[in-house]
Amino acid sequence: MEGTVAVSDAPLPARAGVRFRDLSVPEGPLRAGLRAAFERVLDHGMLLMGPEVEAFESTFAAYCGVGDCIGVASGTSALYLALRALGIGPGDEVITTAMSWIATANAIAAAGAVPVFADIGDDLNIDAETIPPLLTTRTRAILPVHYTGRLCDMQAIGAIASANGLRVIEDAAQAAGARTAAGRHAGSFGHAGAFSLNPMKLLPGYGEAGAVVTSDPELRPRIEAMRYLGTVDREICHEVELNHKMDALQAAFLIEGMKCLPQIIERRQQIAARYAAGLADVVACPSLDGPEGSRPVFFDFTVEVAERDRLREALAGAGIETKIRHPILMCDQPAYRHLPPTPVPRARQAVARILSLPIHEKMSDPEVDRVIAAIRKFHDAG
Ligand SMILES: *Cc1c(COP(=O)(O)O)cnc(C)c1O
């Protein structure tokens, strides 16, 4: 019946296939740390804005090399609050990429502004060269997405922004830990950066969570008020906002998750290198290098292949889960079809060819090799 949940203690059947993600937490230091964090929060009982929220904020700000971090309810909230706190709203246009998860465009629209979709480059990130033709007198900001965990060309984007007096808000939801050779982190290039910390992302929470990072000291008080119904001192309401708070349990879990982030990134980079070595001659693989000497953190390993749908079926037949991330460009979503169209030929070509392969830190080398072998077999069969 709709709405009922079947609960059973029977063990789940062992899965023979290669899973796209594996969000389970095996026994080990992380699981022990999560359990201890849970106990601590239960002991003190400050479940909503407990001390863990501030502790997580200062840990993550230091990690990203920024002045401040504000913990919020989700990556979508983080984007929305960053835009609102920077004064972007009705009458404004925000230039973003055509290819991202719909949360990017929805945050812009929810703030009251209009998303304007630029084209992408071969790295699947916004192509800075396609931004200038989209500028109008209403353009207020550029919102690049470090898609798949790969940094955008922030030098080119920053140059366009400063020449035109625009704000830059980075959607770093997929890119926690991505940084240039000089150590500059995703989220630290613009006026504000937004992270999603949900279990699918690089720095995983164990539910919904997000964060805004910034080095603008004026943003913290504004976002702190906005994340709790627009109130100052939690009682005086100056502006209408909804509830976007991060809870203490998520913050406590995220502090534990931070300890694993370097290993998560390293393992994903190893898997990406193994995929690239095994596949580069048969499908278009993402580059292992990003701008300014950066290395992508591989939220996704997305290949491009003409026979994408047939390949996806063949892999499913071999027990290998893949994803098309995402099958509909943001500008083509029914919610945005009323907007004047912008030319996005490369994004249109890519959306028919992209396929994200399984990549997660629990994947073993034999599992990676199984994916490689299945793709090579498909290729050799023509
Ligand atoms: C996940 C994601 C978001 C939204 O984050 P939530 O925490 O799910 O709200 C925004 N942008 C991108 C690129 C994402 O991948």
Image (cartoon, helix red, strand yellow):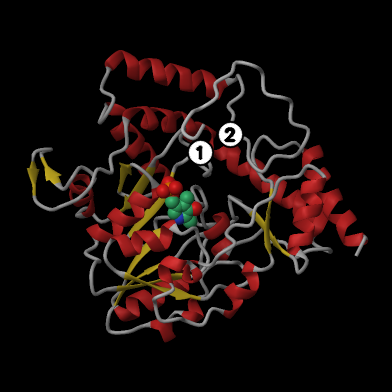
Q: What residue is shown with label 1? A: 199
- Above or below, 363 against 345 in this view is above
Identify the element where label 1 is drawn: loop
The outermost residue toward the right is: 381
The CA span between labels 2 and 1 is 7 Å
- Above or below, 65 against 49 in this view is below
- Above or below, 373 against 134 in this view is above
Q: Which residue is drawn at 92% across and 60% down?
A: 380
Residue 23 is labelled as 2
Q: Residue at x 22, y 54 (%)?
A: 219
- Please say whether residue 172 is visible from this viewpoint: no
Percent x, y of residue 21? 63, 40
Percent x, y of residue 236? 6, 43
For the residue with label 1, is its CB less than 8 Å from the closest atom of ligand 1? Answer: no
Q: Which amino acid does label 2 sit on?
A: Leu
Identify the element where label 2 is drawn: loop
How crowded pointer 2 is (Cα within 10 Å; few <14, some 14-19, many 20+) is rated as few
Instruction: Give the position of the C terminus as an image quadrant.
Output: bottom right
Q: Residue at x 34, y 51 (%)?
A: 78
Query: In the rendered view, does 341 fall on the left or right side of 46?
Result: right
| Lower sequence index among marks 2 and 1 | 2
- Please say whether residue 338 is visible from this viewpoint: yes
Q: Which amino acid does label 1 sit on?
A: Pro
Question: Where, by quadrant of the figure, is residue 26 drawn?
Answer: top right
Percent x, y of residue 163? 34, 80
